Amino acid sequence: MELSSSPRLLSSPTSLMLLKPKVGFRVPQISSSPFHFHPSVSSLKLIGRMEFNRTVCCASSSEGNGSPVAPSSGPRVGEVKRVTKETNVSVKINLDGSGIADSNTGIPFLDHMLDQLSSHGVFDVHVRATGDIHIDDHHTNEDVALAIGSALLNALGDRKGIYRFGDFSAPLDEALVHVSLDLSGRPHLSYDLQIPTERVGTYDTQLVEHFFQSLVNTSGMTLHIRQLAGKNSHHIIEATFKAFARALRQATEYDPRRLGTVPSSKGVLSRT
């Protein structure tokens, strides 16, 4: 190949470099920014994920901190007082609490179970009850459950933005109990526990079913309880309350994708 050029041009050092043949390949410069990639398929996927996360974070945050949208302002608290000729019961429950348990029903085993509800549901549960326990624990057990169900109903309000459904299986040593529930507004209990003894301490084990039936009736909850394993009465009952607490926690927590809407195709969840 011949190059034609003037002698003046060829005598310039710069021009000689320009005319010198280049061998090899060019290495592209890479930006120092860790997120500025060559637009390959993988980088486009990464950018897409980053945009998606940013959008979801903004959509689910009320103050830009990434926390789920809470349709109501402040904690969801239900408070009920129930007075009859047989019992005097007061209940306060905070669904957005920190697991504070403060229960005194006059029935030690029931107090222990309410502690499980508070601890594993991370609810603040305050219960005070006096009743005719000189006869038996039946009326106090029933009225405490009725009051807790009513307090739960009040705390939930219109149920906007919640997950609504909860499902949990809790083991306790050899016992295993499964609980599934729906905060549908329709009361129903399906109960299948085989508790081998008539009492745990002084507590009549027949009252476990009656407790949950009473709670279901006033809260408007569909509740299924199934024993999958277990031989020890205390373990079976305690696993039931733990599973119930965890399932209820799931159901009452806010769904950030729902953005404060009612979790029903009908657009309403009510007790009536």
Image (tube, helix red, strand yellow):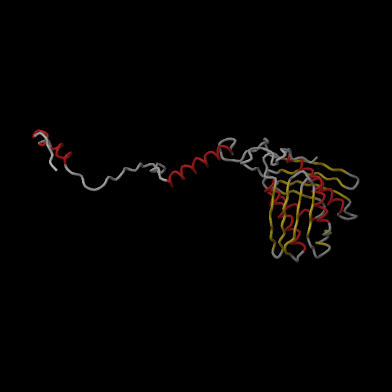
Left or right: 66 as drawn, with respect to 169: left
Locate residue 230: give its quadrant: bottom right
Q: Residue at x 20, y 44 (%)?
A: 22
Locate residue 36: give its quadrant: top left
Q: Residue at x 70, y 40 (%)?
A: 265
Counting from the top left corner in percent of width and height, residue 219 is at: 78, 45
Left or right: 5 as drawn, with respect to 242: left
Residue ranking furthest to the front: 1
Q: Work out whether 196 lies above or below 109.
A: below
The answer to whether residue 265 is seen in the rendering is yes
**Image quadrant occupied by the N terminus:** top left
Left or right: 157 as drawn, with respect to 4: right
Q: Work out whether 187 lies above or below 236.
A: above
Counting from the top left corner in percent of width and height, residue 85 is at: 91, 45
Q: Residue at x 77, y 63 (%)?
A: 233
Left or right: 47 as drawn, with respect to 228: left
**Image quadrant occupied by the C terminus:** top right
The answer to whether residue 116 is seen in the rendering is no
Counting from the top left corner in percent of width and height, residue 103 is at: 77, 49
